[in-house]
Every structure is written in structure tokens, then in C-alpha cells.
Image (cartoon, grey):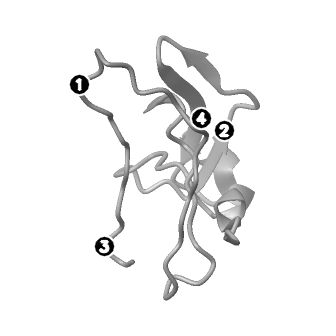
Amino acid sequence: VKYNMHWVYRKEPLKLGKGHKFKYIATAAQIISHNGYHWVYYTGNKRYHRERWKGTENIRLARYPQDRIVALIPRDRAEPAVVTTKTFVWLKTMMSLRVNIAMHTNT
């Protein structure tokens, strides 16, 4: 299976500043992972990059469940894709398996 790695270069892979109408967003160089979450500090400004110093810089913090930031998207969405994981042991005491799947409406 070939994957389109466009998520690395998307304009806004993380939904930062949702509802604030920021035209310029800058994230901290490091993401903090603590207590099951990724914490991302960022600044947002309603002015564009060139004029950001004329606007108000907002410092904000976003939280995402740990290990849920990356997505795999098939290069050709018309073709079915398969992802094979590592093998795992299903213990007799296990009652269920949690799978985190998001289906976008435009797929």
C-alpha cells in the first residue's frame, strides 16, 4: 500500500485556533507529552504574517489525546487500502478491543 504523506505538509494539520479567525499561527518548537496527552503551545494573530506585530498576539495551549495526531490516507481514494499492524496477544481476560478510527465525510 502506498500512502500520501501530505499530512506532513498540510496548512493546518492540527486544528489550532478554531473559532478565533487567526490568520497567523506559530507553534512552539517542542510538543509536551504528559499524562496521556500531547500539549501544544502556540500563538495566534488575526493579522497576516507580515503585519502580525501590528496585531495582538494570543498565547494558547491545545491538548490532543496522546498518539492520535498522525493519520494514514490512501494515495488513491478510489482504491481500497489495507493497514496491517503488528501481531498482538489476545488474553483470555480481555473483553474488548478499542480502535480509534475517524472517517471524514469527504471520503
Residue 94 on image: x %, y %: 29, 21
* Mark 3 element type: loop
For badge 1, the amino acid type reads Met
Tag shown at residue 27: 2
50 or 33, nearer to the observer: 33
For badge 3, the amino acid type reads Thr
Neighbours of disc 1 within 10 Å: few (<14), some (14-19), many (20+):
few
For badge 4, the amino acid type reads Tyr
Q: Which residue is mark 4?
A: 42
Image quadrant of residue 8?
bottom right
**Quick one: which residue is furthest to the top in this view?**
35
Q: Is residue 92 above or below residue 90?
A: above
Rendered residue at 61%/40% (across/down): 86
* Separation of marks 3 and 4 at Cα, in angstroms: 28 Å
Q: Which residue is mark 3?
A: 105
User: Do tag 4 and tag 2 residues touch (Cβ < 8 Å)?
Assistant: yes
